[in-house]
Structures are given as structure tokens and as C-alpha cells.
Image (cartoon, rainbow, N blue to C red):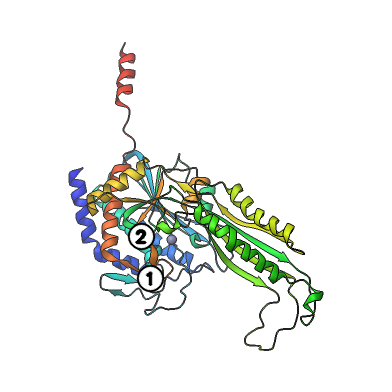
Amino acid sequence: MTDIKADFLARVDAARDDLVALTRDLIRIPTLNPPGDCYREICELLDRRLTASGFETEFIRATGAPGDCDRYPRWNIVATRTGGGPGDCVHFNSHTDVVDVGAGWTVDPFAADVRDGRIYGRGACDMKGGLAASIIAAECLIAAWPDHPGRIEISGTADEESGGYGGVAHLAGMGRFSPARVQHVIIPEPLNKDRVCLGHRGVWWAEVETHGHIAHGSMPFLGDCAVRHMGALLAEMEAELFPALAEKRTAMPVVPPQARQSTLNINSLHGGQAEPDAEAGGYPSPVVPDSCRMVIDRRFLVEEDLSEVKAEFRALLDRLTAARPGFSYSLRDLHEVIPTMTDRQAPVVGAVADGVADIIGHAPEYVVSPGTYDQKHIDRIGRLKDCIAYGPGILDLAHQPDEWIGIQDMVDSAKVMGLALMRLLPGAAPDQGRQTGNQTEGMV
Ligand SMILES: [Zn+2]
């Protein structure tokens, strides 16, 4: 094993330029989501690459998933390399989609410029650099250990940025993450090369609407303004809810530490008539708004129960209904995710932690992500618990302008991933004592 390890590490160092080229090729395919563009194209790139490296590949379209249509089909790829003997299956899962470019870039977001040891571009950090690192790790390990036991799987999946329903959730629904088939999952999201991410907080998205009564804007007393009712709710949230959320602390090691509490974001607020079309011009008409809608994004902790989270918000609304004349509301659930946290003693955690200690030179930091990622589907739908996020890149750069990934960070984390493969592929050591006992019994 010492020879395999030394050979593997030398191969990763030698593959540095290849790693950079692969990352740049991935960034140059603008897999923007929404709308969910170029999934087929990026799967084809991965297919060419991994087939040449000895993987068998499978294209899976999430037909009927949200957003899937003939113009924007949700294509996924799963590549499998079966080794020379029995062992465990280790699966690297990366999402191929990237978020909107946004403003503020000083470089072309899809040119994948290389400068000062960094590759720039939308998706460089989140998470095409991690995907490329996992491919190099697998390829170099296979070259150093062609008859490795077990199986290595690499998937490139759609739609993580919009909930993962056209990607990992679909594959998990097909049984592709059942523990009988896959034993360990590493998701190379950008959590930094020396951190092991055990899971994430929970999510509740809801839309609350306050109701009013339409009237002429010159005589608002004849109507009932839904925006003012929403204003009352916002005031109540400022006075009661936000301070209460700040008091709810968690034992989850969430990073950044400010997220070690419950949080709530107001995603959007729409009241009254739609804004006039800027190009068409014209003035709005004078009406009292009869509807105001707000979308909230509540993040909750492993210590909280989703039903309590909902009840807390509803209690606020019910207090207003009782206290404020004319106040009425409707509340609609949009999306929910239960928090997940893998046990620190789990095999994949230990294997990656040892790799970090070996390559980076110190024990990893164990963290939990403030936002969710595809681990939720692997846990809830796949029922597979031995799953973490580990990959190169600085989390804070995700979704930002001038996003970049450090080349040395990718090299280092590819080494960690390969060492974790060496540890995990042989599977759990057989129980020698019991085998001996059975043999003895048979002999008797
Ligand atoms: Zn990501």
C-alpha cells in the first residue's frame, strides 16, 4: 500500500496541468440554472473524459422534474469504475449547474482565466473545481492501483442550485444512493481543503399573504390596505421574532459562527399592482392594494422541530389577527428540508479526516453548512448516512462576482480524496474471530 500511495501522490502532482485544463473546460460550459442550460453538453464532456479513464457511463434525464423540458432537459451522468475484487462503493457527487452571473465582474465569467495560481469563472469554486479534483483523484488512484477493490462512482448532476430535484433527488428516487448499492458519498462542495462538512441546517420556505380591500387611491378609507397589514407583520417580526431567533443557539458547528442560530430572510415582498413596464412607460393607477405577499426563508437547527418552527410564525400571525382590525392572512408552504448531520465516527468522516491530516498537516475542522446542498436527498430519499461534503474552494466566494478556485487547493484536496478512496474501497475488515470460529466448528 505504501508503494500505491507514493505512486498515487506523484501522479496527482504530475496531473496539475491536466487538472487546470479540465477545470477550465468545465467552466467554459455555461451551465446556468435557471434556466438549466447546457446540461447535456457538460455530461458529454464528462462522458468522453471518464470513458477514456475506464469508467462505464450512464446518462439519466430527470424527465418530469421541475424545469425539465425539451428546451432545458435535466441531464445527469453517473460513471462507474468496477475494481478487481469485492469492496465498497465510494461515490463522488458534484452538481454541474451554476448560478446567475450577476453584476460586478472584472473578468469574463466563462473564459476561465488563470492568474496568480487561481482559475476565475462562474462555478470555479462552486463547484467545477471540486468536480475536476475528484476526477483527477479517481484517475490517479486507478492508475496507481488498477486492480483496486470495490467500485468508484462519479456523478455530475443537475439543479442543485434550485433544490436538486432534477439531479440527486431524481437519482436517489431511482435507488442510485441506496446503502446496498453505494456505501460512502463525498460531495466536493467548496468547504475548504481542511474542513469536513457533516451536514446542514434545515429550511422552511413559506409565502404569507395579507389581504385587503381594493378602493380608489384618493379615498383609502374606503378600502383596506394589504401593504399596511404587511407592515404591521414586519413590525411584529422586528419586535418579537428576530430577537427570539437570535436566542436559539445550536450545538451544530455551523460556519460562519453567526449562523449558529436560527435565521430568517425575507426573500421578496410584493404589494399592490405590478410595476409598470419600464419600456412602455406610463403611470400606475391609484388603487388601494388588496394583496401583499412575502416569501420567507427560515433556516432552522437540528435542535428545532419543523412543526414548532411553523407554529412560532403562525402564532405571530394569529396575534395580529386578534389585535389588528381587518387583519387576515393566508400562509402557504413552499419548500422544506430537515437538518442533517453525519456522525463524526462515520467511516467516510474518518477516511477524509486522516487524508487531511496526512496531506494538509493538521486535523480537519468539522463544520456544518448554513445552507443546504444535495446531502439532504442522499440522507432522506437514499437513506444513506455515510455522506459528507469535502472539497477545495472558499465557501464565501460561491455565487460572488470574480469567483475563483486555487490550483494548489485543488491539487491538495485531490490527494485527500484519493487517500480516502484507498481507505474506503476495501470495505470493512471481515470479522476474523467469527470466521475462525466457524471454520473450527466445521472442522469439529
Ligand atoms: Zn454548490
Q: Residues within 10 Å of mark 1 (few under 14, many from 20)?
A: many
Residue appearing at x 19%, y 55% in the figure: 10
Of the residues shown, which amino acid type is indicated by label 1?
A: Glu
Q: Residues within 10 Å of mark 2 (few under 14, many from 20)?
A: many
**SS category of the residue bearing label 2:** helix
| Residue at image mark 1 | 403
In space, the residues marked 2 and 1 are separated at their CA atoms by 14 Å
Decide which of 184, 101 is in the foreground and name it: 101
* Residue 211 screen position, x and y as percent: 74, 66
Look at 70% across and 76% down and name the residue there.
273
Residue at left offset 17%, top offset 46%: 3
**Quarter of the image where ligand 1 sits:** bottom left
Mark 2 belongs to which amino acid?
Gly
Residue 54 shows in this picture:
no
Residue 435 visible in the displayed image: yes
Indicate left or right for 1 with 351 as reference. left
The image position of residue 375, as x and y in percent, is: 46, 51
| Callout 2 touching callout 1 (CB < 8 Å) | no
Q: Residue furthest right?
A: 222
The N terminus, quarter of image: top left
The one of 52 and 6 positioned closer to us in this rendering: 6
Instruction: Determine whether the residue tagged by mark 1 lies in a helix, strand or loop.
Output: loop
Q: Which residue is mark 2?
A: 130
The residue closer to the viewer here, 175 or 106, is 106
Q: Position of residue 11 (x, y in %)?
A: 22, 56
Residue displayed at 38% across by 67% down: 397
Q: Is residue 370 left or right of residue 294?
A: left
